[in-house]
Amino acid sequence: MRHPLRLVALVVFALLFFGAPSMVRFYTDWLWFGEVGYQQVFTTIVRSEASLFTMAFVGMAPFGNLYGLPVYVDKSLAEDAEIVFNAGTHIDTIRIKYADFARLVRPVIIDAAIRLEMASGM
């Protein structure tokens, strides 16, 4: 790499350029909600936005490999001829042959029931 300092400066500039407006908005909202005595409302908004962000990533989990995320499938699903999963809304679903899904996504097959049992301490 010929100019590592330029690359670092470019990355820092990009982070500031794209991230600073969000940080300023967050800080001013925090100050305003605190000033009017509604700090709890602000924390509720922040928690709900974080939850929605998390749910969005869980919702796209069937094709997480497109985003560099690992995809795990319970071994009982891997034994089915077809699988059905959420298509991004509460109404729409996608039905696909498991063999096609496995070819496209290359999921890691696990025994999720045992892992969840161990995680819960049973």
Image (cartoon, rainbow, N blue to C red):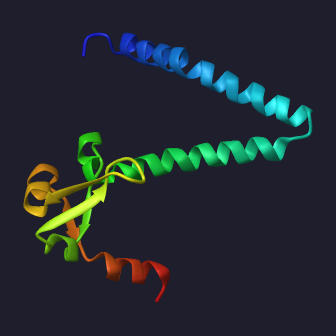
In the image, what residue occupies the spot 68% across and 22% down?
A: 24
The residue shown at (34%, 15%) is 4
Measured along the vertical axis of the image, is residue 63 above or below residue 97? above
Q: Residue at x 14, y 73 (%)?
A: 80
Residue at 14% from the left image edge and 56% from the top image edge: 101
Q: Which residue lies furthest to the bottom in this view?
A: 122
Looking at the picture, how far across and down is residue 43, in whole percent? 74, 45
Residue 45: horizontal and vertical position, in percent?
Answer: 69, 43
State the image coordinates of residue 32 (x, y, percent, origin top left). 84, 29
Residue 45 is left or right of residue 37, and the answer is left
Quadrant assignment, res 9:
top left
- Number of marks in picture: 0
Check the image and report above or below for 17 versus 71.
above
* In this picture, residue 61 sits left or right of residue 1: right
Q: On the rendered image, what quadrant is the N terminus found in?
A: top left
Is residue 79 positioned above or below 102 on the image? below
Whether 13 is drawn above or below 37: the answer is above
On the rendered structure, is 19 left or right of 3? right
Nearest the viewer among 121 and 47 is 47
**Viewer-closest of 97 and 8:** 97
Residue nearest the observer in this picture, 95 or 28: 95
Q: Where is residue 17 in the image (x, y as percent from the top left)?
A: 53, 14
- Can you tell which quarter of the image residue 19 is in? top right
